[in-house]
Image: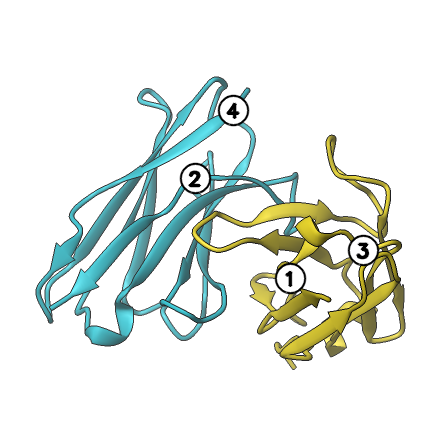
Amino acid sequence: QVQLQESGPGLVKPSETLSLTCTVSGGSISRDYWSWIRQPAGKGLEWIGRIYTSGSTNYLPSLKSRVTMSVDTSKNQFSLSLSSVTAADTALYYCARELGSTSAFDIWGQGTMVTVS
Amino acid sequence: SSELTQDPAVSVALGQTVRITCQGDSLKDYWPSWYQQKPGQAPILVIYTKNTRPSGIPDRFSGSTSGNTASLTITGAQAEDEADYYCNSRDSSGNHVVFGGGTKLTVL
């Protein structure tokens, strides 16, 4: 079965760029939508954006100027870059698979905590 | 509007039925999904596309939508259902995803 695993630095300095990678195992990354979702401690879920395996993207409007997503089908990975981070970007970051284009996320990674400090 | 609104907290007696609601204009056009999240765990999809349960989700979970309001109903709530529940859907543009603020369910 398909599994997702986030990886990347747990600590990022203010004004720098947060970079995370999600590795897809147990299946192909092809022909699906892949999203990044974050959750500050004690708060709700916030969708950041998604990428299709063709490379097309959609980003949350409020983050669009700072977000870049990419996909590497040869490595079965997709990535998130968030520039000019502040303490408000401190959160648990999840990668997730979207069922078709339903906005239903059926598979989630375990999440990776990123602290901006 | 791109917002989905949920009640912050709901409680239910063990074995009783509880409805968790989610309101938003985009729900008139797009199906909602529902997630269960327990402390320290990633969310789990429990309902999507009108009233579809992924494999392994008990049939006491069901979903419905009327106008701009979606509902997740748990019929015969169990102690293990105590968790945070989130709805999500597309926003009104259809190009982005939005989540509700979440509802903390307490099983008494």
Mark 3 crowdedness (10 Å alpha carbons): few <14, some 14-19, many ≥20 = many
User: Height in image: A35 above or below A76?
Assistant: below
Determine which residue is flagged by label 3. B77
Q: Are marks 2 and 3 in contact (CB under 8 Å)?
A: no
The quarter of the picture where the C terminus of chain B appears is bottom right
Determine which residue is flagged by label 2. A109
Q: Is residue A19 left or right of residue B2?
A: left
Name chain B's colour.
yellow
Mark 2 crowdedness (10 Å alpha carbons): few <14, some 14-19, many ≥20 = many
Query: What amino acid is found at the position of numbered circle 4 in the picture?
Result: Val
Query: Do marks 2 and 3 both belong to one polypeptide chain?
Result: no
Determine which residue is flagged by label 1. B85
For marks 4 and 1, give the one nearer the viewer.
Answer: 1
Residue A42 in percent (x, y) is at: 42, 70
Residue A1 in percent (x, y) is at: 55, 19
Q: Which chain is drawn using cyan?
A: A
Real-space Cα separation, disc 3 to disc 1, in angstroms? 14 Å
Give the secondary structure at mark 3: loop
In this view, the residue in front, A102 or B54, is B54
Query: What amino acid is found at the position of numbered circle 1 in the picture?
Result: Tyr
The residue marked by circle 2 belongs to what chain?
Answer: A
* Residue B29, label in figure: none
